Image (cartoon, rainbow, N blue to C red):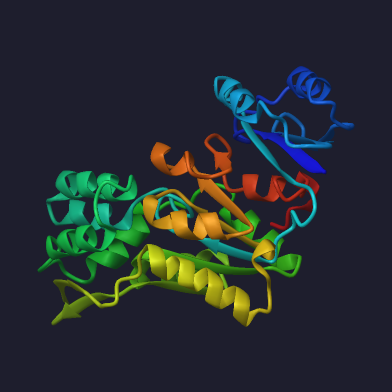
Amino acid sequence: MFTVTLLTNPDTPLVDRATVESLRNAWGGGDARWLDPGVAAEFAVPAMPENRWQVWEDMQSLKVDLVVQPTEGRRKRLLLADMDSTMIQQECIDELADEAGVGAYVAGITARAMNGELDFEAALKERVGLLKGLPEAVIERVYRDRITFMPGGRDLIATMKANGGHAALVSGGFTAFTARVAEALGFDENRANTLHAEDGKLTGTVAEPILGKQAKLDALEQISARLGLDMGETMAVGDGANDLAMLNRAGAGVALHAKPSVAAQCDIRVNHGDLTALLFIQGYAREDFVA
C-alpha cells in the first residue's frame, strides 16, 4: 500500500475537499483523512500511480505539495537536517559576508554551489577567505539580528523526539551557528565546519576536513548505526546539492524549498509547506504535534 499526502503552507490553507476527493476517486484511493483541515490530508492507494509526476505538476499551480510513498515504515526514528535555508531561513555565510561588505558577491557563489554548479569545498574556502579580518563578535550579532527559524522547526523536532526519535543538525556551515540553532530548536547533536579566529578576528580559513556532501552522508550512516537503526527508519531534509547524497540514502529524503536541480533528483519535494510537512508525511495530525 501507498499513502498519498496533499499539503500546503499552514498560513494559506489551500487544500480543499474537492481537490482531495477528485484525486482520491481518480486513483481509486481509500477514505481521506484530514491531518489539518485546509492544510494537509491523506488517503491510501493500492499501487504507485503511473501519472504521479504529472499530477504533482498540476498541484504546483495550486500551491499544493503532493507526496506518494510506501505506507509501511512512514514514521521515522532519526531526523538528519541541513541548517541553512532549511532549519533557518538564511545562509549564514552570506549574512557574515554582508557584514564584511562582500554580501552580493558571496551570495552569488553560494547560490551556484547549492545548485551544484561549483565544487562545494573550493567554493566554501573562497567565501571564507573573504571574511578575513571580520571581528569574531560579528557572529553573535548576526545570529541575534539576522537569523530567523523556518516555521514548524520546533514542532518537528519536539514531536519526533516525543515519539522516540533522535535529531541531528548537520551543516556545511559553521559550528558557531549550528550550536546555537541546535540548542534553540532542541536537536540532540550537531556537526558543521569550524571557522578559525585569532586575536578576536576571523583568519579567513576553516578547519579541515571540510564537512560537505560526503560528510553529511557519513553522518547519516554513523548516527543510524550508533542508534541501531536501519536506513528505512531515517529521514533527511535539505535544499542544496551538498545534501543530495544523504537525501537519496535516507529512508525518506525531503527536498525542502530546494534548488530545482536538487528537487528533480528527490522523490519527496516540499515547495509550499513548512517544516511541519515532515510530520504530515509521517502521518501525524495537527493534534499530535508537541509544542
Front-most of residues 66 and 289: 66
Quarter placement of the N terminus: top right
**160 to 215, vertically: above or below:** above
Q: What is the count of numbered marks?
A: 0
Residue 201 % position (x, y): 15, 74
**64 to 253, vertically: above or below:** above
Q: Quadrant of residue 178?
A: bottom left
**92 to 39, vertically: above or below:** below
**In this rendering, position of residue 265 left or right of residue 163:** left
Residue 185 % position (x, y): 55, 63
**In this rendering, position of residue 146 left or right of residue 89:** left
Residue at 19% of width from left, 55% of height from top? 97
Residue 161 % position (x, y): 69, 67
Residue at 79% of width from left, 25% of height from top? 27
Residue 172 % position (x, y): 36, 63
**In this rendering, position of residue 205 left or right of residue 174:** left
Quarter placement of the C terminus: bottom right
**103 to 44, vertically: above or below:** below
Front-most of residues 231 and 204: 231
Residue at 21% of width from left, 57% of height from top? 123
Task: Note whether residue 183 is visible.
Answer: no
Task: Note whether residue 214 is visible.
Answer: yes
Q: Residue furthest front?
A: 50
